[in-house]
Image (cartoon, rainbow, N blue to C red):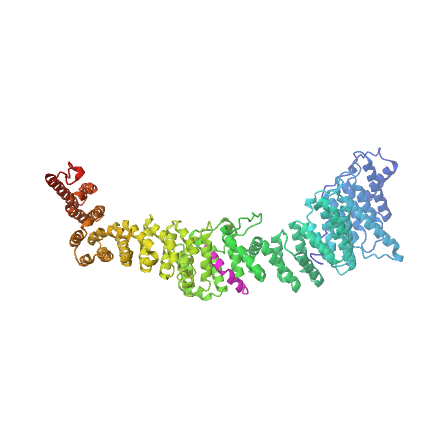
Amino acid sequence: MQMNPHPRKQKSNRTTFSQSTGQFPSNPNLHGLRQSERDAYELIAEFLDQGQGSELEKLKFLRAVETLSSAVHAQPNGNMNDYFSKAILARKIEVLILEEITEALVSNVRPQAMLCIVALSQVNPPFYLSQKLDLVNACISSIFSLPLIMPSLDRKESASLYLQTIQALDDMLQALVMEDMEPNMPILQNFLEIILPWLTLSEKVHEQSRALGTISRMLRFICNFPELSHLTEFSITGKLMGILGLFCMNTNYEISAEASEALHYLFKILVLHRSLKQKTEGILKELQKHFRGGWFANIQSLTMFFRKYLTPEERADVIMVSMETMSSASRHDVCAASKMLKMILKHSLPEIGKVPEIIQYTYHNMNSITETTAQGTIEKILYLLAQTYTDEVILTLFKMEDQSQRGVHKPWEILASFPKGYEVIMEFLLQKLTPHQKSKSQEPSHRREISPLIATRAIHELLLEPNRRIEVQTFFSSLFMTLLNQISFLVVEGGTDIQDQQHVTEWVDPVSATVEALKALMLRAGYGDYVSFVQKLGGWELLTSPERHYEGVTLLARAMVVKNCWHNRPIFSFIIKTLQEVGNTNHLTAFVFMTELLRCPGVVATVDEATVCVLAGWFQYEEPSTVKLLLQVVGIFAKHGNMVRQLRILQPYVLNCCYSLDSDIVMETLALLRCLMEHLTWQHSSSFLIQLTFTLGPFFEEEPDHLRLLAFEIYRALLAKVKRTVLVFPLKHQVLNLTVLLVLHLEDVNASVAQVCRSALCHTAAVLRWSRLRVVFAEKDVWTILRALLQQEASKALWFLKQCVTLFKSPQAAIRQTAVRFAGQIIQTLDAEEADDIEEVCTALKNMQEDPDPMVSCLATQTLYILEAKEKLQANTSTSCFCGRRAQKSYS
């Protein structure tokens, strides 16, 4: 299983130390040593001076170092540097090991040197880490490079020496890994990183076997300790498990068995230090049953440990080891890696770390993995990661694409190749574009999250894949409106959040990217002619214009209506759903699009009472643009017909808009009411129409001619719908109450208003059964009409008088003049009993003496004089004055 260059090419320049080694002590104290220990000192000094020696001299030197080490170790505060520099001794031993030939094992120097290192490791000062690594590297290289040594009758001595050498290596590794009576796990990791290349890069079985055996025995040694030093810093567990798992499936039985044994001890370490204490014994017994078991049993155990005992980062290492193996030239290694990955990913994906690293490897090595099974496995990994870690996968893909700018599309093809996963990823991306739709139960994640722009780019990439048209149809409506809302946010509000600013490259424009995604969606759904239609009308340019954006939205919706798009109704349903949600910030775009969409008969036919209730709630928002659109919607409903119940819900909200402080809304409302008069029937809307007659009152005296004209037109249309059979209180009362107003507005400054009022008077006469007056109303001048009205309806004189007083406040001088004059006429016709009720009229007339129009002021004064004269006349002929309770009142 080849993954990197050969180990022998990695270990150059590791035969010298980086630490300062110091010098020989000038006057070592030898008095405390025995004679044999002094002899050992002299022998070491002599050997170091001569530099070279025979095998016998080397062995004597090594034994002398052992002897002196034992002496120093026995001293209370012994330190080898008091006699010789420990660093110099270690370097010399390393050189001796490296000088040994690797073509054959004929000397005892290797095992003796390693035992010497064990002895040195027991005395002060302790070895530096770099010293340990150089010694281990030298020993591993010297021993593992030896040719295959098979036990036989004629090679007993060689086999025995080899076993001694291996045992010495184990002793040395165990001694060097210890620190304060406990194995130091970071040091163990460094040793394993020296050994593993001999397993993964070598093509020789005996070298792989030696590496596996050494690893297995080291792990078995570690199992003996209940406490391990710096265990959390041991970060090679996942990589080690992945490598050993793959070698369990090796075709060579010896390799497979040794890998299985090493994996067993690795599992045991995990159980001892990561499982609950009360369950440890049971798990170990179960684990022992599969000791040196077959590859399938080992992979089953590996799958369980992968899910339950490894950290997310360690799981990622297992996956990475397998993926690296799948780019191997060996078909067996590729199949083994595929099998292992399929087993560990068979069930739901546990938490995985290092997702960007996995995606980067996949991105850069996709084309080098050619075996069909391996390709399928890689695709599944990418798919599973994209479903669970969509943010990180998409961010990593774009980061690499933006850096390389070479547009490798293979990962996107893979993400789009799984129908169910395609939908899940798209749904996830949709949520990134609609923050208010995020689940409230979703816990905050410490992982990176994609921005709306990155989500849009990812959607565009996925939409470019040609084989997912069915899936596109299912989420077309929601994605269409979401992208359109995003365009509105970017264009109108200039919305680019901090995340977007971080991720946007110089050549990515957020608006253009989103528009292109919307076009891609329409093309993938089969609406290419719609895209062209909007293009011809300049709709895409309007859509990106801050000043005319909503015109572009309207054009886009119009294209859907003109082409009778199948998705019109689903889009409408989606809009209504979003308008129900709290915190919806893109409502204006939704209303603009919906208003145009409702011009499609198929869409408006789906509007039920629940939908109307949602729309009615938005009237309370009181934002002018929204209210205007709602008024347009009501007009569309009215024109459609057969929407009596829906309109009945909206009518109170429409009337309420008449009182808006926004003059444009008032104008729009009156225009809508005029439209409603054309389509509503008395049978279905009597209550609304009666209420409307009272609502219109203030608008009859509006100064803007167009508002006043609209109000009278509405009232005329309303009167035209009234039948005699339905003329009851309060409608009859209001019709009578507006009679004088209609007459006096025959003198309105606006000729159109006067014309409408004459027509309204005719309708009034018809509903009130004033057949004689109807002719007068149709043909005569104002004063003829007033005299005829007062003559025929003398019993209503006081009522007419009150109407005149109301018109004293008219902004038009001509109407005020006529009102005052008619009031004077009415007063003169009142009898004594009726005259008791004109106190308010007298007050109003006094106020009119201050009217800015001199004619009105003069008429008011004259009328008061007439009242005073009539009062005096009444006083001379009657015991009660004309004005009853005001006998002494002056009107001048």
Location of residue 182 with respect to 634 vertically, above or below: above
Q: What residue is shown at x 25% (from left), y 57% (from top)?
A: 767
> Left of 679 or right of it: where is 102?
right
Q: Front-most of 378 and 472? A: 472
Q: Could you tell me residue 584's position as x and y percent?
A: 46, 51
Q: Is residue 501 visible?
A: yes
In depth, the one of 709 and 133 nearer the eye is 709
> Farthest right residue?
153
Whether residue 478 appears in magenta in the rendering, the answer is: yes
Decide whether residue 376 is among the magenta residues.
Answer: no
| Relative image position of residue 311 (x, y in whole percent) | 66, 49
Q: Is residue 15 visible?
A: no
- Given residues 66 and 589, the one toward you in this image is 589
Count numbered badges in the picture.
0
Q: What residue is drawn where x is 37% and y is 52%?
A: 627
Residue 278 screen position, x and y as percent:
72, 44
Q: Which residues are magenta?
A: 464-486
Quarter placement of the C terminus:
top left
The residue at the far front in this view is 879
